[in-house]
Image (cartoon, rainbow, N blue to C red):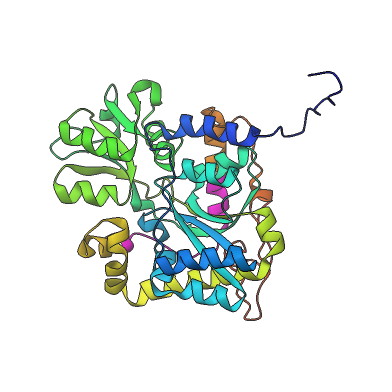
Amino acid sequence: MGRGEAPTPAHAVRPGEVERTVKRMNGLVGGLVLVGAVVGGFTDCEQSQGDAARRTGTKEVRIALQPIPHFAPLYVAKEKGWLQEEFLRQGAIVKWSSFPAGPPMNESFASGKQDIGLMGDAPAIIGRAAGIDTRIIGRSSSGPTALAVVVRKHSPISSPGDLRGKKVATVRGSCAHHLLTIVLRNGGMTTDDIRFLNMSQGAIATALEKGEIDAAAVWEPLITRLSGQGTARVLVDGTGLKKGILVIVATKAFVDRNPVLVRKFLEVYERGREYIRENPREAARLLSGEVKLPPVQMEKVLARFDFDSRLSDDDIAELKASEAFMRAARIIRERVDIATFVSPVPPGPSGFTGGSSPRGAAPGTIGVE
């Protein structure tokens, strides 16, 4: 500290500290995941709207997502233009950003470049532990069968116990990593009993094809893609073990200042969910290009998910279990209080409470201890 410079309080966040912490954690969690945001998925018209927003001072809502089926209702709403239309009625426009994974999305949040984002429970908790001031406003999806430990199609491995001593890969700190630890624990093992490898989903697919690994813990659409190619088969999925929750987060500042937009976002998400339920084949066609999965396979994948955005008590319990797992594995250092991480969303005139009022709870309540 130079002369004349005031000491920094121990609890204060130093400039750039959150970004550096997120990058450190992303490196730990992402492994070989590409750390670099790819802005895309929006049209020239939407880009020009963004330019106009900066010129006129119109509110611009920045929304981040990933090209995976777990966020299907929002992709439907995007393709149909529903969210853009609803936000325009509220005097706001949408700026879309697409990311290859949760870690680079966290970096974008840490840099103040996003307002709302959809990601797995793990990166959401990691970002919060790193000091990013976000809140969970809803659940994007859950799907126990969309999360699995897979082995090569003709592998002799027939039970979790057969994984002992084998090369098993996953993305460290992901929901799949959590599932793997549960599967091993149920078989009386830990990751010390296998040859654990931290790899991205893309690298896992290649390694399975080449026979360089014996098994992997992965999620959709890779499960369906590998099964369809005849590369791998499911050894055990999340049924009865892990629900596979993904969440919708928003910065606390955005939630506090824009409760109407938060509510409208969740209402549009619900509209997308209903469309998928009533038109699964057409929804699969709309999503096929984004997810890079043929429509026939896409329709089967969509059937694996529950897209209800409301968090249940079971969801809250799983978020707590995920947080405890990441602390035990030393993926995060700071405890994340799930009760305060989940933000209550005020009910609208129609009574729709959105994602953070659990199913069966009174409107505006969180339903956590």
- Residue 256 in picture, x, y percent from top left: 71, 60
Relative to 79, does residue 329 appear above or below in the rendering? above
Residue 362 visible: no
The residue segment tinted magenta is: 302-319
**Quarter of the view holding residue 129:** top right
Camera-side residue of 354 and 57: 57
Q: Residue at x 30, y 34 (%)?
A: 160
Q: Nearer the viewer, residue 69 or 241?
A: 69
Which residue corresponds to the image point at 66% horizontal and 46% vertical from the top-left?
133
Q: Is residue 268 left or right of residue 177?
A: right
Is residue 312 part of the magenta span, yes or no?
yes
Residue 206 is situated, as x and y percent measured from the top left of the image, at 22, 36
Q: Position of residue 315 (x, y in %)?
A: 53, 54
Residue at the extreme bottom: 350
Give above or below for 8 relative to 282. Answer: above
Does residue 149 belong to the magenta stretch? no
Relative to residue 118, is residue 110 drawn left or right? right
Q: Position of residue 278 (x, y in %)?
A: 35, 77
Is residue 245 at all visible to an observer of this figure?
yes
